[in-house]
Amino acid sequence: MTSFQPAQRVRAISVSEILRITDHANALKRAGRPVIVLGAGEPDFNTPDNICQAAIRALERGETRYTVLDGSSVMKAAVQHKFQRDNGLTFALNEISVSAGAKQVIFNALMASINPGDEVILPTPFWTSYADMVQICGGVPVLLPCSEAQGFRLEPAQLEAALTPRTRWVFLNSPSNPSGAAYSAAQLKLITEVLLRHPAVWVLADDIYEHILYDGLAFATPAAVEPGLRDRTLTVNGVSKAYAMTGWRVGYGAGPKDLIAAMAVVQSQSTSCPSSISQAAAVEALTGPQSIVAERCRSFQARRDFVVAALNRTPGLHCRTPEGAFYTFASCAGVLGRHTPGGVQLHTDTDFCHYLLQDFDVAVVPGTVFGLAPYFRISYATAMTQLEEACARIHAACAALR
């Protein structure tokens, strides 16, 4: 029998390393190990009750059929309302796309716009799916390392130097996964000034963590900071993070109608419309009471403060205070070169994370996965009791090194 041969476009790509680490850790838990999993970017809160009730009412009304391909008119109107209310951005309904998660919005946009060899600039550390999606679509990921010294943020001169005639997109994710770094409006303005000088380059703003922002920092998004970029910007968002709706799978994007129409073609030949019931729930999320979003953000900030302080008290570790999202991205450079109690020398952040899991039952993700080493990411979107125990174990793990 002839063995299966995968298509060339996927041969160099594997399932998300974050998911692989999380799955392995969960398998250890099922086997009886007391593993604390700090890998997945998923709020531990339940979906708010008013949103669940909206879904139940939709079921009772029989709203279980296909909707319009890229989002019902009611859902698109809710997205339209959200952009106007929160960002001061006005979009027509044919400038809005709704998909099965923000990830699909991004994939649709790339599939609809990338030609073989087109370059996509990705500041690192970055969400690893960006690069894989670019490659599947035939593009070339251009990774720009953004050091801790620059706040894990892209600098204007760095962007200017990286732009070429093949550059099709620049991705901006603020607040960021994995670093939690966020751009102020003033910082973003410097980036948009560069982009204004390059009219062939488009901007993808991944704003999925918009509402998880700390210390009074105001949210900023490129199309609002620089209206001159509106006609070549896709602004992507969703309900997963702010409203604890990861399993509902609803994301949305807004941009020029020609791009949105091309994205609809891609979606028409893949998933078709998002779930009708999930859309009904998302309408309530976007248009209903918003107070719980700020309340939960305060809870995330308390967790951030605890984890950052705990890591900075741990020998060999250093952790910058993130501005948003629910991740810390800590340096483990200070423990590399040391030996575990079992005599294994730690050479990389991957070695360190393996040590934490195998010897101390804490699952975190190495910075190498996100394109910047030697760091590791903790998702603190979990209960404080879990975070306290995990940080105590990490401290003990570092103290045991020699």
Image: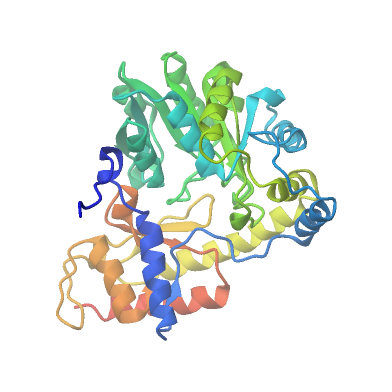
Percent x, y of residue 329 = 40, 56
Percent x, y of residue 336 = 20, 65
Is residue 312 visible in the rendered image? The answer is no
Query: Residue at coordinates 17% horizontally, 75% vertically from top-left?
Result: 339
| Front position in the image: 371 or 274 | 274
Image: 164 above or below 222: above
Percent x, y of residue 22 = 41, 66
Task: State the quadrant of the N terminus.
Answer: bottom left
The quadrant holding residue 114 is top left
Query: Residue at coordinates 51% horizontally, 64% vertically from top-left?
Result: 380
Image: 334 above or below 229: below
Tell me if 6 is positioned left or right of 233 in this view.
Answer: left
Is residue 254 visible in the rendered image? The answer is yes
The quadrant holding residue 129 is top left
Residue lying at the far bottom of the rendered structure: 32
Percent x, y of residue 101 = 57, 45
| Front position in the image: 375 or 361 | 361
Task: State the quadrant of the C terminus.
Answer: bottom left
Q: How is the image coloured?
A: rainbow
| Front position in the image: 328 or 48 | 48
